[in-house]
Amino acid sequence: MKSTIILIHGMFQNAKSWEPWVKHFTEKGYNCIAESWPLHEGEPADLRANTPAGLGELRLAVIIEKYRQLATSQTEKPILIGHSVGGLITQILVNEGLAKLGVAISSVAPNAMITLDWGFTKNSALITNPLKGDDPFIMDLESFQGSFANTMSIEAVKEPYERTATNDSRNVLRDCLGEDGKVDLELPHVPLLFIAGEEDEIIPYELCEKNAKAYDDELSSTEFRKFAGKSHFICCEPGYETVIETVYNWIQQKEDMPPYEV
């Protein structure tokens, strides 16, 4: 039996966004677990139409704890694959020694690591705006196309928006920039793969590369891959199959490496 893979989504998505990944890795013999964050369970269209009570107060620590418990409940350490905030959660759990391998896709960077890129600055400011308090961020079609899936036309993005997009808590990103988003970058760690989209308006590829290069342990394996023409919607936008295959091949190479005790 192959390893268990836990897939961790990011903001403005839920477990529905991982359906092509679950299908691919299940067919390859892996046991896949894709669970939604708290207050993100269900059909995205329903969640957008009826924002769950308390969504705006959801905190990063609550989400991390869900996946920490999921990881520790497995009989063997799982492979973690996370997108955006899920990529940061993947790094945190790898840092805690709870993973066999880690893949961080278009990942929010730890330790309040930022870039001066305009898209990153604009989108981060819109989400974290302190004047909005605990009001959830409402993800409409235009915002989704303009920032999340900016490589796709408004017509092309309508279907995936309807199928995958959710509203979200501003506090999650705020917490990513604080104490709950910290990682010890000097610790030895199991192999980590960082993936970025060259056209990402939310997490620029330069920030992903900076994040990958910040890991200091010379004996630990850290790799970075950039995909041309890909946005923050890299896991689902047209051509996502190439990203899945890259991750699959990397896992095949690294899975039998002796793990560090971290």
Image (cartoon, rainbow, N blue to C red):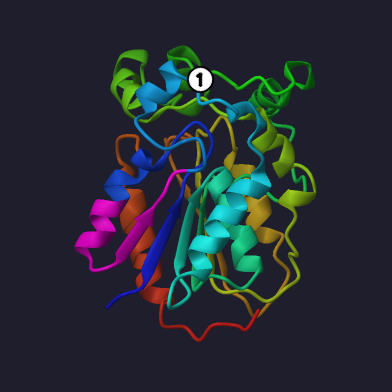
Residue drawn at x 67%, y 36% is 173
Pointer 1 residue: 139
Residue drawn at x 53%, y 57% is 67
Screen quadrant of the N terminus: bottom left
Residue drawn at x 33%, y 22% is 162
Q: Residue 73, how many percent across, how many down?
A: 48, 69
Q: Residue 93, how many percent across, how many down?
A: 60, 63
Q: Residue 36, how many percent across, how many down?
A: 44, 44
Q: Is residue 32 in view from this perspective?
A: yes
150 over 202 or under it: above or below: above
Give 197 or 178, whichever is nearer the viewer.
178
Q: Residue 182, how many percent across, how many down?
A: 75, 55
State how many labels appear: 1
Q: Name the residue type under label 1.
A: Met
- Residue lying at the far left of the rendered structure: 27
Residue range in magenta is 22-36
Dot 1 falls on a residue whose secondary structure is loop
